[in-house]
Image (cartoon, coloured by chain):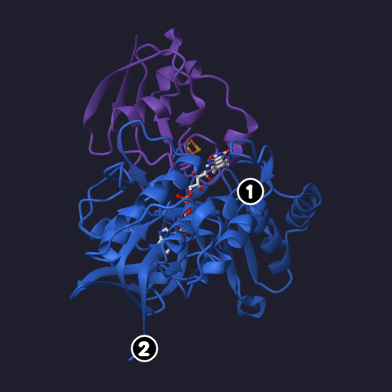
Amino acid sequence: MSEIHTTDVAIIGAGPIGLFSVFQCGMLKMSCHVIDALPATGGQCTALYPEKPLFDIPAAPNINAVDLIERLEQQIEPFKPTIHLNQQVCELVKVGDLWQLITSTGLKIQARAVIIAAGAGAFGPNKPPLENIEQFEGSSVHYMVQKRENFRDQRIVIAGGGDSAVDWALSLADVAAEVYVIHRRDRFRAIPESVAQMKALAEQGKIELVIPYQLASLEGEGDQLNTVVVKTLDGEERRIEADHLLSFFGLASKLGPINDWGLDILNGVIKVEPTTCATNVEGIFAVGDIADYPHKLKLILSGFSEAAQAAHAAYLIVNPGQALNFEHSTTSGVPAL
Amino acid sequence: MTTLTFIKPDGERVEVQATNGATVMEVAKENDMPMLAACGGSLACATCHVIVDEAWYEKSGEIVEAEEDLLDTAHGLTNTSRLCCQMKVSDEVDGMVMTLPPMG
Ligand SMILES: Cc1cc2nc3c(=O)[nH]c(=O)nc-3n(C[C@H](O)[C@H](O)[C@H](O)COP(=O)(O)OP(=O)(O)OC[C@H]3O[C@@H](n4cnc5c(N)ncnc54)[C@H](O)[C@@H]3O)c2cc1C
Ligand code: FES
């Protein structure tokens, strides 16, 4: 049996609002474990726009998204949160008085209260919505390349039009038996030199650019793919015999398991009571982009305030019967946990 | 007021009233249409993909390169696919019909 961690508050999502929730809980002397599907903290700030400046963070007139996350990390450091990355929270169930979270790597965390700061859901590969794609995942459909050698003498279809698609087309042209690049238009979003190199290889017949096509369906036996069917926008079909599909459409967020926890969810957001950020399930709070109430603004600013509301409301659940003394940080300082 | 029609993935047609100047994504969200629009209109997610009725496509406005680039990451594209956070409501599009692809 794997070890079970226990904590006062489990926070789902290590985006800016999940991180600031650690601070607000810490100021009320509550310990936290934080879980995120991504390999790094920062949510959208890190995954989607690390180098963009933000202008609407109070008292930080111009701050890059990565720097904002770094400062939040500094601010929560005194509270020594445990942060579990690279895993998605898949299950949330009540075990006695506690909430138990189970992640995709089998980690178990038990907490008195849960704060969901999951943004638009767990970040993962943006998968093409092909009916049977999961059947081939891991064996012949891939969203990243671990070992180039695995593709020696294989027939490879690469789908996508960004850097990953172009870079892997160039790299695999040498080792693979055949390389096809499926893209919906002639323009690629990649370094121009690499695109030029890829087009040169195409002229030499080392790779084939299958343009303008998009993925239509997959055929194969068990987990082994044998044919990738592609279509033009006008429905013209082409069948490509292949051993592997490399799908490179960037990141997408998926609510996934959060839909199954009995929460009041509509169109990807959870209804909360705005003064406490309490959801319809006692002991579970939602903050940041995923929390919804009338006139909600999806801003980091609003999320910070929601984190404070949720932490104060969670205190009463984590410490039943104990008075909550409201204190300014100028009075309390940063308490040791 | 401008009238827009959304056809939901299940085929239901919903006619809504929209204020000129709003984005079509804002109108869809206001009316609880099944659409994620995860990035809130900052052209970073492609989850506001709509298929514009052919008769209206020309009127749906200019497509900037950044929208084309992001459309590369959408699935089930058609010749009249748009990211509707980039489309503004105006008298020009009064009556426009759009189909919503299934939410991922
Ligand atoms: C291009 C762009 C520009 C923006 N500019 C601004 C701006 O100028 N000002 C502003 O205020 N806002 C801006 N925003 C919006 C801002 O980034 C979001 O409001 C903010 O990131 C929301 O933070 P969050 O912590 O709620 O969620 P997110 O940042 O979305 O983080 C959620 C995290 O939860 C994780 N997660 C979800 N479900 C699970 C699960 N089941 N298990 C494990 N992990 C999970 C995800 O992987 C993700 O890392 C911008 C957004 C974009 C895309
Ligand atoms: S809402 Fe994200 S691209 Fe339109």
Furthest residue in direction bottom, as rendered: A1
| Chain under disc 1 | A
Q: Residue sitting at 73 percent across and 55 percent down?
A: A202
- From the viewer's perspective, tell me whether residue A12 is left or right of residue A162: left
Task: Please rate how many residues cluster around mark 2, counting C-alpha atoms within 10 Å: few if below 14, some from 14 to 19, many from 20.
Answer: few
Furthest residue in direction left, as rendered: A96
Q: Identify the secondary structure beneath mark 1.
A: helix
Ligand 1 closer than 8 Å to the CB at disc 1?
yes
Tell me the residue that label 1 is attached to. A65
| Chain under disc 2 | A
- From the viewer's perspective, tell me whether residue A59 is left or right of residue A173: left
Amino acid type, callout 2: Ser
- From the viewer's perspective, tell me whether residue A55 is left or right of residue A303: right
Q: Is residue B37 above or below residue B60?
A: below
Total number of numbered labels? 2
If the image is split into quadrants, where does the N terminus of chain A sit? bottom left
- In the rendering, at what x and y percent does residue A55 appear? 64, 36
- The answer to whether residue A238 of the structure is visible from this angle is no
Of all chains in the rendering, the one displayed in purple is: B
Indicate which disc, 2 or 1, sits on the residue closer to the N terminus: 2
Tell me the residue that label 2 is attached to. A2
Most foreground residue, A8 or A118: A8
Q: Quadrant of residue B78?
A: top left
Q: Residue sitting at 58 percent across and 39 percent down?
A: A58
Task: Please rate how many residues cluster around mark 1, counting C-alpha atoms within 10 Å: few if below 14, some from 14 to 19, many from 20.
Answer: many
Colour applied to chain A: blue
Q: Identify the secondary structure beneath mark 2.
A: loop
